[in-house]
Image (cartoon, rainbow, N blue to C red):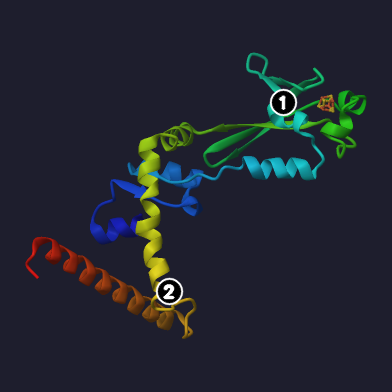
Amino acid sequence: MDRIQEKLGRLPEQVVVDGGFTSREAILDMGRRGVDFIGAIADTTARAASQFARRGVEAAFRPEAFAYHPESDTYTCPAGKVLHYERKHRDIGVTDYYYRASAADCGNCEFRKNCCHANTNAGRSVVRAEEALAVAAFRVKMATDEAKQIYRQRGPVAEFPNAWIKTKIGLRQFRLRGLAKVTMETLWACLTYNIQQWIRLRWRALSVSGTR
Ligand code: SF4
């Protein structure tokens, strides 16, 4: 964004990026810059589920089975035991609040092997994540049809040149070494692509207008 502003004298009104660039940090930064940010924030649900499965936590004892009580800032586990607030950890765009059951409750629990069999000296813990308002608003926006429609345009615009350069020019790896030389290879490939696109679009425009 800094380089765009430097080269063009202003920031874009809207930026569309793939999942690799859609972080909470980027969402906050774009908000500060006043740029409408469209992206695909990673859904960590599947990864979290597989981590719990690896740790032997059965589905009925995953975090969603623990009830949160805002008035007392506590959780209740599936066995009815209370998890008290323990600590918090701030990260960019999110604060994680940790809650833990007592070691005695879990140690005597009939569900311990289904819930937290790896905890030998401590009770089960759960984490409640509270995202920054801008991040929460971004999730709401990206659930709308309008934002999804904008995001769908990214692939043809941003990925086609990569595919074309790889397939048509065969630039799957650099033939030379050193930053200056690979920059030159890349520039030639991009220039070739741009000229090819210019000819194609120009030809199409002339064909449509009948002034070939
Ligand atoms: S092991 Fe602990 S947290 Fe899990 S159900 Fe039993 S008492 Fe609750």
The amino acid type of the residue labelled 1 equals: Ala
Q: Residue lying at the far bottom in this picture: please name it.
A: 176
- Disc 2 is placed on an element classified as helix
Q: Residue at x 45, y 35 (%)?
A: 143
User: Percent position (x, y) of residue 45?
Assistant: 63, 40
Query: Quick check: is the Cβ at mark 2 less than 8 Å away from ligand 1?
Result: no
* Closer-to-camera residue (181/63): 63
Horizontally, residue 196 falls left or right of residue 112, namely: left
**Residue under label 2:** 167
- Disc 1 is placed on an element classified as helix
The amino acid type of the residue labelled 2 equals: Thr
Query: Quick check: is the Cβ at mark 1 less than 8 Å away from ligand 1?
Result: no
Q: Nearer the viewer, mark 1 or mark 2?
A: 2
Give the alpha-carbon distance from disc 1 to disc 2, as whole Å: 49 Å
Above or below, 174 relative to 66: below
Where residue 163 sits, quadrant-wise, is bottom left
**Residue under label 1:** 65
* Closer-to-camera residue (111/205): 205
Q: Residue at x 87, y 23 (%)?
A: 105
Q: In which quarter of the image is the C terminus?
A: bottom left
User: Percent position (x, y) of residue 176?
Assistant: 46, 86
User: Percent position (x, y) of residue 197?
Assistant: 26, 69
Horizontally, residue 96 falls left or right of residue 159, namely: right
Above or below, 202 relative to 145: below
Q: Residue at x 14, y 65 (%)?
A: 207
* Closer-to-camera residue (121/113): 113
